[in-house]
Amino acid sequence: MELAFVGQKFILVGIIFLISLVVAMYSTYAERKVAAFFQDRVGPNRAGPFGILQPLADGAKMFMKEEIIPTRANPFLFIVGPSLAILTACIGTAVIPWGQKMTIGSTVVDLQVTDINVGVLYLFGVVSLGVYGVMIGGWASNNKYSLLGAIRAASQNISYEVAMGLSIIALLMITGTLSLREITEQQHGFWKDGYFSWNFFKQPLGFLLFIVCAFAETNRTPFDLPECETELVGGYHTEYSSMKLGFYLFAEYINMFVSSAVMSTLYFGGYNYPGMDYVNEQLGNTWGPLVGVAVLFGKIIFFIFFFMWVRWTIPRFRYDQLMDLGWKILIPLAIANIVLTGLVSTFLR
Amino acid sequence: MPILKKGQRYFCNYKMSLFYFIAFLSILFALLVIFSKNPVHSVLYLILTFFTFTIHYVLLNAQFLAIVNFIVYMGAIMVLFLFVLMLLNLNNDSEPVKTNLVKFAAIIGGCCLLLTVAASLKVASPSIPVVLANPNLGLVKGLGKVLFTQFLLPFEISSLLLFTAMVGAVLLATKDKTNA
């Protein structure tokens, strides 16, 4: 029994890991296609039909390139940097509930690796750990541009973590739990007690703050100042080549996948969708939850597309504008949101 | 030592060896913080030390403390430390010269610490470091209830203390600007 449980979790972890890698791989392809669409170009179309083998070709290229470690760099930390970046990107998926409990034969499979009762805080911890990969890599390169990129990454992440934490607090005041499974179950279906059950409709401002902070934490445009090529050559990864550079770029796409999953789970009902009870009744306990998983992935893909949409639409912030936005606009708004949430939940119930 | 059932004792032994291994790592990394020449390496070892503390909390089933230690110390304070050290870019030339007064003060401080450790060892009694009297003590619900009922006053006062520090930091920062 115990061994079966461990085996089940092991398989689940393997599948989730594989899916995050595949999604990240095809995000690079999607990014180029989306960019091409926005700029009225064709995009990659040489490798395979519609260029769908392009990520494989890119990966092979990354592995084949010469690996360079600068002479004055710290060789150990130079390797630790990208490894940490990809590690912290991958561990966030552990607490996300991917679907309802599923019955295969006689066993009930929980489509969540672990339901710790501090799930939201765990995600927050992983996010705050994410900056180390960039900082350590940037410092170990022993290059001024890399160091500036690393310092920018650190200050940006710390500033936006505050606003992100405050926006989550308002959400937690409504849910009353830190477990992601319970938060998702509270958003069951779409309509409950005369109001929308998804948290987005209860916390619109909180969601807006959260998504802005998610952009900043994943270093995506308009907040990609740590790798601002017009000012810093390549930012923190200036000195990197071959697959170590690949890891940094790849970590960004995995982060995008994880933060999209978190946004769908916290604010957009996760695997819940309108009329899910009816579908579950029709399809039974094996295929019904899988529809929920497909719905969750639909939401995730929409958010990944949104990340790309913003990247190819909005120009980059200037550094002082970035700090002003974080400290003078987002944090006061987040605090106001907490006060408002407190007042509403006290006087309306 | 409380009397334990056989299965529990087995579990305890297994947890105990894990505890001793993690405790060894904590002390090793803490020593490396002091002995590494490069300040950035020191901070990185300090991060590892805090990480081992997080594991200690998890062993005690104090999930909330574990994760808060993780977020606040590893994720925020240490990033700031690293940030400042990277900005300063310290090396051997910029190391301040230690005067005899500083060395003398350090010796006295070290002796005081030794005295405290010796005194506390004398009264310490052996305990099981991996079993709590109340296993739900460290979970969010238990901690929240205790903080907002029994320890409300100290909790609020400590928040006031943090607030004062914040206001002080802002005041210091803006003072410089008006003078310049």
Image (cartoon, helix red, strand yellow):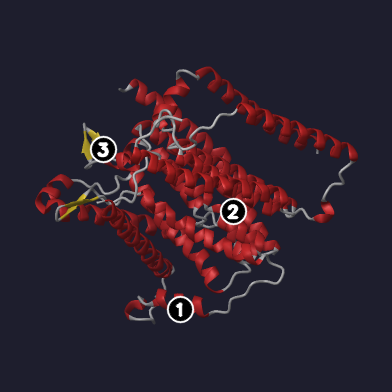
Q: Residue at x 20, y 55 (%)?
A: A291
Q: Please state which of the two labelled residues, at mark 2 or mark 3, is closer to the viewer.
A: 2
Q: Amino acid at mark 2?
A: Ala
The chain identifier of the residue carrying mark 3 reads A
Dot 1: few (<14), some (14–19), or many (≥20) neighbours within 10 Å? few
The amino acid marked with disc number 1 is: Ala
The tag earlier along the polypeptide, 1 or 2, is 1
Badge 3 density bin: few <14, some 14–19, many ≥20, Cα 10 Å = some
Q: Can you tell which mark lies on residue A196?
A: 3
Q: Where does residue A317 sit, x and y in percent of width and height?
A: 57, 53
Tell which subunit mark 1 falls on: A
Q: CA distance from mark 1 to mark 2?
A: 29 Å
In this orientation, does residue A320 appear? Answer: no
Tag shown at residue A60: 1
Q: Residue at x 23, y 42 (%)?
A: A190
- SS for tag 3? strand
Between A30 and B46, the residue placed more toward the observer is B46
Marks 2,3: beta carbons within 8 A:
no
Q: Is residue A29 left or right of residue B22?
A: left
Q: Position of residue A117 (x, y in %)?
A: 37, 39
| Disc 1 from disc 3: Cα separation | 47 Å
Residue flagged by tag 3: what amino acid is it?
Phe
Compared with A236, B47 (above or below) is above
Q: Which residue is mark 2?
A: A153
Q: Taking B112 as reference, is A129 above or below it?
A: below
Q: Position of residue A111 (x, y in %)?
A: 27, 52
Camera-side residue of B13 and A159: B13
Mark 2 vs mark 3, CA separation in Å = 37 Å
> Tag 2: Cα neighbours inside 10 Å, few (<14), some, or many (≥20)?
many
**Quarter-wise, where is residue B113 in the image?**
top right
Image coordinates for residue A210, horizontal then vertical, percent: 44, 44
Q: Earlier in the sequence, mark 2 or mark 3?
A: 2
